Each structure stands twice: as C-alpha cells, then as structure tokens.
Amino acid sequence: MKFGRRKKNDGKPALPAVQTAARDALELRPVQLYSYALFEQVRRTVPIVDAAISKLIRLIGSFQVECADASAQAGLDAFLRDVPVGLTGQGIYSFIDNYLDSLLVYGNAVGEIVADRSGTSIAGLWNGKVTDVAVQPGASPMERTYLLRTEKGDVLLPHPERIVFSALRPPAGGIYGVSLLQGLPALAGILMRIYECVGQNFERAGNIRYAVTYKPSDDPGELAYAGERARTMAKEWSEGMQAAKRGEIRDFVSVGDVSIRVIGAEGTMPDTEIPVRQLLEEIIAKLSIPPFLLGLNWSSTERMSAQQADILTSELEYYRRVLEPVILRIAQAFLRTQGICTRLTVRWDNINLQDEVELAQARLHNAQAAEIEQRLGIHNEE
C-alpha cells in the first residue's frame, strides 16, 4: 500500500456516536485572524514576551525515539536526524521547534508529512501556517477535516492523514486551542504606551529649551528702543545656540532686566517603576517563566527560585506531553514506509542538570535507607 493512500471500504464505515457533542457546536467557526495578528504584534513589540517564548522552546530539551525492534533503530535515527524540514531546516528538532513556537503563540500548530512523487516514502516535513488552514469535524465528531484558505475560497485537503495538528488547552468540545499570549494584548498596549510616554518625556526634557525674557524699565528712552533690543537679543541668542551645536562657546551679553530659564524645569518626570513592574509581573505570571531567567533582578530567595524552577519544569513537561503524539506519528509514518510495525517510545532528556543532581541524591538516599533496613533485618533475625 502506498504511503498516504486511504483504504477504500465498500460498505459504510461505522462512525462513533458521541452523545454529548451538539451538532451545531461542531460546525466550522471562522478562526479569529485578528486575534492571531494581535498575538504576533505582542511578540514583536514586547521583547520580554519574545525572550520568554524562545527560552521555553530551548528549555523543552531533546529526546530519543526508541523502537521495540532493534533492527529498525538505526534507520529511524538517521531519518529523524536528516529529514528535510521546509526550505532551510533539517532534522526533527527543527520541525518541533517551529511547531512548538506556533503552538505557544497561536494556541494551534499544523504540520505536514510530505510524501514524494511516488507516494511510497517521506520527502520531508513542512511547518504550516495556522492562518492558512481551517479545521472542522468530519463525518463524525472524532474525525477531522482540513481546509486550505485561498483567495477563491476554502479547499478541502485530499490527504488529511498526512496532516499533524495540535491545540493548546482547547475548551471542552472545541477544536482550536488557547494561545499562551491570550489576555496579554491589553497589558502589552498599556506597557507600550508607558514606554512611548517615557520616550517623549525624555525627548522633551533632554532637548532643553530656554525662555529669554526682557523686561524694559520705565525710562522713556529705553521703552523707545525696547522692540529693537528684543530683536537683537533674539538674534544673538539664536546665533549662540547654533554655535553651540558646532562646538563653539559664545557668551550672551545683554543690558537691562533679562531673565533666562529652562522651559519645563519645574516639572518632574513621573515615576514609572511601579506600574511597569506590575505589568511585567502579570505578563511573566502568564508566561510561567521565572523572572531571573529573563534578566529581571527582582528580590527572591534561594528557596523561592527553586520553587519557580519546579513550576517551570511542570510547564515544560506539559508541553512535552502535547508534542509527544506528533513525534510518534512522524516516526510511525516513516516505519510504515519501510514495512515495519513496532512499538515506539519517546525518551526525553532531563530538563536541567539540577534534575540530575536531585536524582543522584535520591538514589543515594534510597541506597542508604536500603542498607540500614538490611542491617536492621539481620539484627532482628539474630
């Protein structure tokens, strides 16, 4: 059987009957492309969000797909290491990194196992754009169909078995997932307005402007030439300021009652540390990233940092559980093209060296406890 060819049945297939799935709730709903655009804008405009997503992708770690059939292990390893991904990528890690990136930003990720022209082997993997693909239930609530959005309308994809699709925390009965950035566009908008105002205030305060005030006395002779003297002062002051830009130093000499002050010197810059920190705390709480990993030197104890690391570890394990079916499906598709059907297991590496240390300490404590129990058991027998 060629790769990707759907098996034909003469009779009607027995479709699963889902009693709690309302038919109207399963109809295709348009994806909110506007929300996707907002999520992209948040990532582009708020550097801490982009840094958090990049760190989550790197911290997810590496993995090994193990075969129950040892003779197929070498071929599977070579395929996962060398499989082309898109136009520039290579290897399963390149595909999974882009897949997880889309999953975190949009709440959904889509990819394709690309078959060669003969349809008997895998030519590569492709990371699709979730904005170009729509998902809807098929003949039953447990079956998915995929449509490609084009300018002429939606086109049904003929080989849904080659598509891999994942949703992040989808609501009950829903198809599409929830983005990790959901709820952040409003906070990011406030944060960027604060930064914009800070930049404007510093531009105004940094580019100092002066107010030169000439007050003539009550002498009729001085009053007669007050306008001419004011124009002369304005000309000399302007030339002095232009000379300062060229690095020349000029003194300003005047007669009469002349006062010079800085415009806006009485005003003070508003303190933005507290509101900015409050917004960043909300953003980081949503992203589940410890602040010290993002370069934020907030006060935290060693125990608090360890607890934050444990919380991050649980988040990464959740993302691994979402990605594991995708990895297994790609590996199984390759083995089927080789005529091999065997059990596969994904073995993830420990997330960090701290886990290795804790595991080693746990093994040491267990060994010590076993030794003590053995001694007590020998003593009781005697």
Image (spheres, rainbow, N blue to C red):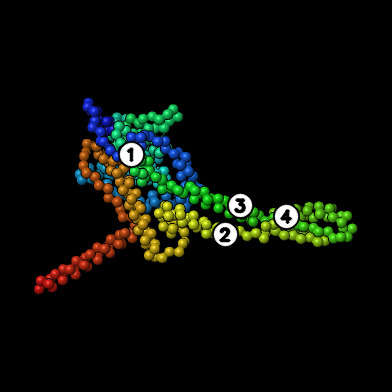
Q: Position of residue 298 (x, y in %)?
A: 46, 62
Q: CA distance from mark 1 to mark 3?
A: 47 Å
Amino acid type, callout 1: Val
Circle 3/circle 2 CB separation < 8 Å:
no
Residue 136 coordinates in the image, percent (x, y): 35, 35
Q: Which residue is mark 4?
A: 241
Q: Position of residue 253 (x, y in %)?
A: 79, 60
Is 121 above or below relative to 254?
above
How many numbered circles does the render carry?
4
Question: Of the residues under marks 1 and 3, which one precedes in the sequence?
Answer: 1
Query: Residue 326 sits in which quadrant?
Result: top left
Residue closest to the eye, 10 or 161: 10
Nearer to the camera, 23 or 374:
23
Q: Quadrant of the C terminus?
A: bottom left
On the image, numbered disc 2 is attached to which residue? 271
Q: Earlier in the sequence, mark 4 or mark 1?
A: 1
In the rendered image, the residue lying farthest to the left is 382
Residue under label 3, please give it.
200
